[in-house]
Image (tube, rainbow, N blue to C red):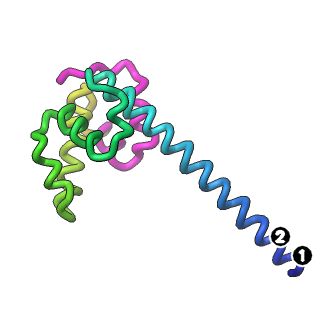
Amino acid sequence: MTNIETAFATMAVGLTFFLIFLSSALSILLIVSLWKIFTKAGKPGWASIVPIYNTIVMLEIAGKPIWWIILLFIPVVNLVISIIVIVELANKFGKSGGFAAGLIFLPVIFYPILAFSSAKYTG
């Protein structure tokens, strides 16, 4: 193996570890944010780490029927339902449609803002 190959291999390993660290940090940030949002809405915070149950709790917070979880398993329909739930989540915390767009397109920024701001749940 030449020095150039060794350098590229080292850079690839370093980049891989950096990406793993970054994705882990962002995942933890979103989990903590959802935990805080659930707590603000009077739901158990631990529900944010339980798959499927966290979606049920999110539907409850947004004021949507629980059976909508079935719609989330249908391709394309799930996108529409997700957008409706996120817009309603923003509304329940007194936020505008622009904030809901932020939740949809930049969740890593807007979920922590919703979680750690003075927004109150009005459900």
Instruction: Describe residue 105's horizontal placement relative to residue 97 as left or right.
Output: right
Label 2: state its secondary structure: helix
The range drawn in magenta is 99-123
As drawn, 84 above or below 6: above
Which disc number belongs to residue 7?
A: 2
Main secondary-structure element of the magenta-colored stretch: helix
User: Picture quarter containing residue 92?
Assistant: top left
- Marker count (numbered): 2
Q: Position of residue 23 (x, y in %)?
A: 54, 50
Q: Nearer the viewer, residue 101 or 49?
A: 49
Please indicate, yes or no, whether residue 74 appears anywhere in the rendered image. Answer: yes
Please indicate, yes or no, whether residue 114 appears anywhere in the rendered image. Answer: no
Instruction: Describe residue 109's horizontal placement relative to residue 15 as left or right.
Output: left
Separation of marks 1 and 2 at Cα, in angstroms: 6 Å
Q: Which residue is mark 1?
A: 3
Q: Position of residue 66 (x, y in %)?
A: 13, 41
Q: Nearer the viewer, residue 10 or 50?
A: 50
Quarter of the image for the C terminus: give it: top left
Q: Nearer the viewer, residue 85 or 16?
A: 16
For image coordinates 37% across by 18% down, the residue present is 118
> What residue type is disc 1 on?
Asn
Instruction: Describe residue 5's horizontal placement relative to residue 88 as left or right.
Output: right
Q: Is residue 119 magenta?
A: yes
For image coordinates 34% across by 28% down, the residue present is 37
Q: Nearer the viewer, residue 45 or 88?
A: 45
Q: Is residue 14 magenta?
A: no
CB under 8 Å between discs 1 and 2: yes
